[in-house]
Amino acid sequence: MNAADSNSSRPPADLAGLDLVSHSSLHTERLGERLATHAEAGDVIALWGELGTGKTVLARGVAIGLGIDEDAVTSPTFIILREHFGGRLPFYHLDLYRLEQSQLGSTGWEEALDSGGLTVIEWPDRAGDLLPADRVDVRLEHVAETKRRVTVEPTGPRSRRLVEALRADAFGERQ
């Protein structure tokens, strides 16, 4: 199984997601901005996708949407967790690429999830069943060199609120 696949279950049918196409890294970044605009304290966004699909670009967009300096957001691969303050909400950016589930306890990731900020997790498959049950799953897939298929799916009632707000913002519609 690869990182684009989720070992977690798909959301129930009544939790409608969004299926989008990003034509550039700027589009992907702007999607992150829109997600952040509607995020509330305690929200979790899990970014699924292969290397180079735009997970860190989307995370940078989330930071921008929170009012955090975009230059501060880089892939935290060797640091695991980066904390960003000074925006509308604290922003916790986790990259679990180099970890196994058994190593999560020493990363501070549980504290980030409980902190009252917005948490974005790259390579969430590494967390397995420890991943929060109610989160927004964003899956990014290569379509062409700069084009990505992006699916945004809620996995519970809290994340459904965020996805519905994104839908209303982007398309002027509600489920």
Image: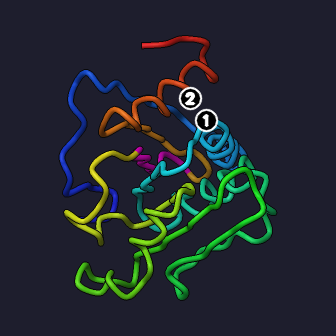
Q: In which quarter of the image is residue 113?
A: bottom left
Residue at position x 48%, y 68% from top? Answer: 112
Return the x and y of residue 172 as percentages of the image width and height.
61, 12
Instruction: Using the image, tell me which numbered label, if any, was put on residue 2.
Output: none
Q: Taking 90 as reference, is 125 left or right?
A: left
- Look at the image and give the residue range highlighted in magenta: 136-144
Graded by Cα atoms within 10 Å as few (under 14), some (14 to 19) or many (20 or more), the crowding at tag 1 reads some
What residue type is disc 2 on?
Leu
Q: In which quarter of the image is the N terminus?
A: bottom left
> What is the CA distance from the residue labelled 1 to the residue labelled 2?
7 Å
Residue ID for mark 2: 166
Q: Quadrant of residue 132?
A: bottom left
Residue at position x 39%, y 84% from top? Answer: 98
| Colour style of the rendered protein structure | rainbow
Residue ID for mark 1: 38
Count of marks, rendered view: 2
Tell me which secondary structure the magenta stretch mostly adopts.
strand
Q: Nearer the viewer, residue 148 or 70?
A: 70
- Marks 1/2 in contact by CB < 8 Å: the verdict is yes
Q: Which of 150 and 105 is in front in this view?
A: 105
